[in-house]
Image: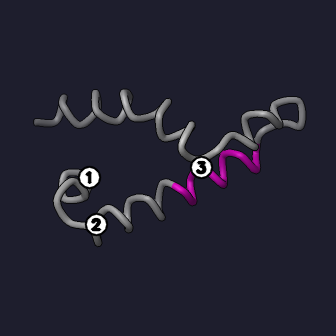
Amino acid sequence: MLRSMLTHPEAADAVRAALGGQVDRVGAELPSDDARLRDAPREEIDRLLRPALRALLDERE
């Protein structure tokens, strides 16, 4: 699915929705003293996680 998202808009939408839901669930579990993380824009979270996701995908190829 992750590889398909690079060339198929429908797959990209599905991955964004799935990851967005996971980000929302993680944010809901953060203690109140980490509220700044919970309120981070999705684009910032994407930017921070992108290198980790790429590393994971490169290992599978």
Amino acid type, mark 2: Ala
Which x, y percent locates residue 29? Answer: 76, 45
Magenta segment range?
A: 20-29
Earlier in the chain: of badge 3 and badge 2, it is 2
Please name the residue that numbered disc 1 is placed on: 2
Distance, label 3 to label 1, CA atoms, is 17 Å
Q: Is residue 17 above or below residue 6?
A: below
Q: Main secondary structure of the magenta part?
A: helix
The residue furthest right is 32
Earlier in the chain: of badge 1 and badge 2, it is 1
Residue at horizontal 25%, vertical 58%?
A: 5
Callout 3 touching callout 2 (CB < 8 Å): no
Residue 51: quarter of image:
top left
Amino acid type, mark 3: Val
Please name the residue that numbered disc 3 is placed on: 23
Left/right of residue 2 with respect to residue 43 in the rendered view: left
Amino acid type, mark 1: Leu
Specify few, some or many for label 3: CA neighbours under 10 Å numbering under 14, 14-19, or 20 or more: some
